[in-house]
Image: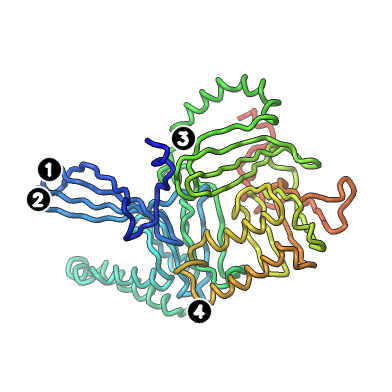
């Protein structure tokens, strides 16, 4: 493969004037006549939505044709559980992106749509209910003839769905997506929506298999490799702080093979961290991620900084992947895991947060966003730009990290900073549950 070919994005924008869309042809068995047909594949992406794979099969022997669209989404590092309280007509009209792997539940009526019963779709809460009602009604005439009892029970449940759709009483819709690629519209965007809760979680083995990840099967091989490398690691640990390591990966934006650089470093007055940075030559996408090199701290930490000078925006900041951030004056809050781990400045962190808000969720940007959402985003972005430019003072930026692995530079170190408050606190059960500590045995684990 030439360097020119390898530098092109795997999923390219679909354009009518593209002279070389790079379709792939594969000889495939025709299930109709048993002869060989041809399947054509085209990898492209829908603007502000996701990557897709277009497939077209044709058999020249029997004339059978078939077209199909499959998701090309990358699997996110964590699964997503979305809960939304539906209490009025606006809530029913919330836009929903449901991936192939998502399970939809309405606990109040014991209703569930399993994953892969339908391909991923863009719809609304009302659209999900309407489609279910129509699907159940479609086969009712046959059921009434063959199994009247079952038809009567289904008819009763259809009435429950109709009442739910008409909002006889409020209900909760839950979308559990192990792939992390489902969304429900935030009607208050970019502010916090009190009716909408999004939680990110670690997948279990069954969920990994559902999304096509079988890491456990490689566990034995990895353990053997780690055993062989343990002695070398012990000898070279001190050298890592002076060395930049390189390993191959794929660009998170265009999937082109690229290189990630990793380095272990020490932050003064804090701790050791691991910094990883990726730069894609094909599309120009850049990412950096930071992970703690010393595990979870004994206590959580909450850091509050009052912006009083333009130089405050230049402070170094380490935001771990378990840290949430809020700006009370803007009624703005983002949960843990939104940006992953970041080692940058406050200016860089706020800029990355702005890019994430305007580019990651297709329901607050592009063709999927409503006019009111676009106006609110424009107004919010202007306020955020003023903070980044050092034009707004008196606001507070709060970092809350239950793992205790986040840091904000004290420009007066080693003296205390009059504009910054640092509070260490004991984690509660919910914090430990989110960090996975409730399932760990931290004492006398040798006995097991």
Q: Is residue 361 above or below residue 188?
A: above
Out of 128 and 325, give the one closest to the viewer.
325
Colour scheme of the rendered structure: rainbow
**Front position among marks 1 and 4:** 1
**Mark 1 vs 4, N-terminal side:** 1
User: Furthest-right residue in view?
Assistant: 415
Out of 93 and 191, give the one closest to the viewer.
191
Q: Residue 174, image x and y in percent?
A: 48, 63
The residue shown at (40%, 47%) is: 10
Residue under numbered circle 4: 88
**Mark 4 vs 2, N-terminal side:** 2
The residue shown at (60%, 70%) is: 194
Q: Residues within 10 Å of mark 4 (few under 14, many from 20)?
A: few
276 displayed left or right of 91: right
Out of 405 and 83, give the one closest to the viewer.
405
Whether pointer 4 and pointer 3 mark residues with C-beta atoms closer than 8 Å, the reply is: no
Residue under numbered circle 3: 216
Residue under numbered circle 1: 35
CA gap between label 4 and label 3 equals 45 Å
Badge number at residue 62 = 2
CA gap between label 1 and label 4 equals 55 Å
Q: Residue 406, image x and y in percent?
A: 72, 48
Whether pointer 2 and pointer 1 mark residues with C-beta atoms closer than 8 Å, the reply is: yes
Task: Please tell me whether mark 2 sits on a helix, a strand or a loop.
Answer: loop
**Front position among marks 4 and 2:** 2
Quarter of the image for residue 26 reads: top left
């Amino acid at each position: 493969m030439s360097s020119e070919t390898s530098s092109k994005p795997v999923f390219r924008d679909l354009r009518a004037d593209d002279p070389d869309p790079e379709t792939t042809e594969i000889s495939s068995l025709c299930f109709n006549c048993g002869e060989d047909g041809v399947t054509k594949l085209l990898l492209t992406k829908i603007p502000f939505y996701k990557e897709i794979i277009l497939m077209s099969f044709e058999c020249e022997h029997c004339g059978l044709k078939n077209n199909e669209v499959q998701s090309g989404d990358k699997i996110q590092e964590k699964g997503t559980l979305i809960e939304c309280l539906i209490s009025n007509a606006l809530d029913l009209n919330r836009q929903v992106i449901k991936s192939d792997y998502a399970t939809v539940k309405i606990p109040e009526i014991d209703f569930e749509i399993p994953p892969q019963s339908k391909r991923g779709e863009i719809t609304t809460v009302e659209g999900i209910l309407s489609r279910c009602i129509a699907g159940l009604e479609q086969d009712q005439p046959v059921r009434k003839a063959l199994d009247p009892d079952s038809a009567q029970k289904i008819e009763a449940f259809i009435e429950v769905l109709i009442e739910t759709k008409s909002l006889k009483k409020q209900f909760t819709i839950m979308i559990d997506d192990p792939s992390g690629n489902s969304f429900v519209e935030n009607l208050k965007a970019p502010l916090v929506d009190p009716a909408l809760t999004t939680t990110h979680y670690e997948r279990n083995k069954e969920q990994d298999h559902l999304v096509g990840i079988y890491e456990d099967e490689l566990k034995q091989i990895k353990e053997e490799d780690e055993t062989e490398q343990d002695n070398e690691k012990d000898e070279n640990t001190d050298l890592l702080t002076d060395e930049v390591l390189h390993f191959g990966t794929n660009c998170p934006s265009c999937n082109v093979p690229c290189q990630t650089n990793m380095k272990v470093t020490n932050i003064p007055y804090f701790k050791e961290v691991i910094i990883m940075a990726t730069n894609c030559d094909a599309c120009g996408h850049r990412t950096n991620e930071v992970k703690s090199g010393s595990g979870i701290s004994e206590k959580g930490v909450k850091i509050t900084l009052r912006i009083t000078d333009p130089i405050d925006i230049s402070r170094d900041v380490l935001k771990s992947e378990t840290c949430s951030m809020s700006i009370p004056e803007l009624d703005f809050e983002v949960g843990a895991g939104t940006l992953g781990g970041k080692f940058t400045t406050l200016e860089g962190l706020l800029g990355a947060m702005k890019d994430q808000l305007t580019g990651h969720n297709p329901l607050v940007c592009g063709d999927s966003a409503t006019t009111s959402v676009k106006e609110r985003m424009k107004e919010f972005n202007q306020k955020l730009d003023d903070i980044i430019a050092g034009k707004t003072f008196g606001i507070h930026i709060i970092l809350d990290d239950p793992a205790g692995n986040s840091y904000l530079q004290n420009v007066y170190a080693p003296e205390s900073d009059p504009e910054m408050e640092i509070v260490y606190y004991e984690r509660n059960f919910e914090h430990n549950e989110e960090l996975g500590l409730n399932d760990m045995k931290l004492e006398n684990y040798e006995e097991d």
